[in-house]
Image (cartoon, rainbow, N blue to C red):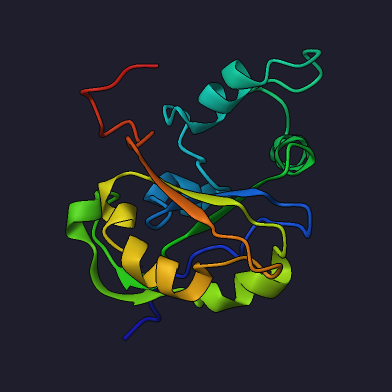
Amino acid sequence: MSALPTSFPPLVSVQTRLLVLGSFPGVASLEAQQYYGHPRNHFWRILLAIWPGDGAVTFASSYQQRCSWLLDRKLGLWDVFAECEREGSLDSNIRNAVLNDFSALKTACPHLQAVAFNGGMSFRHAPRVRAALAENAAGAEVMFYSLPSTSPANASWTL
């Protein structure tokens, strides 16, 4: 019996103000060892459209460059699930999932102001995330938002 695939560690800093929570990396992301690593996932393109900057970072930039760029904007990434069984990449195929320990974010992200859930599967776990992060380390309320999935499987939305 093989071990369950595991999610990536949180991509956050003490400056993180907004955390984007996905459900669990798809096959292409796991193979690339990158958040939103599928070439047709809209995540990175959406962020680059919102913060076009000086053009120094583009979708074609290295993953490390995009991650640094993201952290510079006080954004963070993580997933709802630490591990799960799943055939393929569809969230509807997730079975036997284990949630991440969100309480660890209070120390890791003491200035966290908001959590945005990338897709419906991750948003279903908002109450458990809220229970762990109702307030940031300074006691301020953390806001929660549901976003449409950036997955290429979400054909009802285009960039």
Q: Position of residue 128 (x, y in %)?
A: 36, 72
- Any part of residue 82 in sight: no
Rendering quarter of residue 11: bottom right
> Would you say residue 23 is visible in this rendering?
yes
Q: Residue at x 73, y 33 (%)?
A: 62
The front one of 148 and 8 is 148
For the C terminus, which image quadrant?
A: top left
- Which image quadrant is residue 23 in? bottom left
Q: Residue at x 71, y 58 (%)?
A: 111
Place of residue 138 in the rendered image (x, y in percent of width and height, measured from the top left) = 71, 67
Q: Nearer the viewer, residue 142 or 90?
A: 142
Q: Position of residue 145 (x, y in %)?
A: 40, 45
Residue 149 drawn above or below residue 106: above
Q: Nearer the viewer, residue 40 or 79?
A: 79
Is 74 situated left or right of 33 in this image?
right
| Side of 94 relative to 113 (left or right) | left
Above-or-below relation of 121 to 125: above
Residue 80, image x, y percentages: 41, 63
Tally of numbered tags:
0
- Indicate the quadrant containing the N terminus: top left, top right, bottom left or bottom right: bottom left
Tell me if 95 is positioned left or right of 45 in this view: left
Residue found 26% across the figure and 34% down from its top: 153
Q: Residue furthest left?
A: 92
* Residue 50 vertical placement versus 30 (above, below): above
56 with respect to 75 (left or right): right
Name which residue lies at 18% across and 54% down: 92
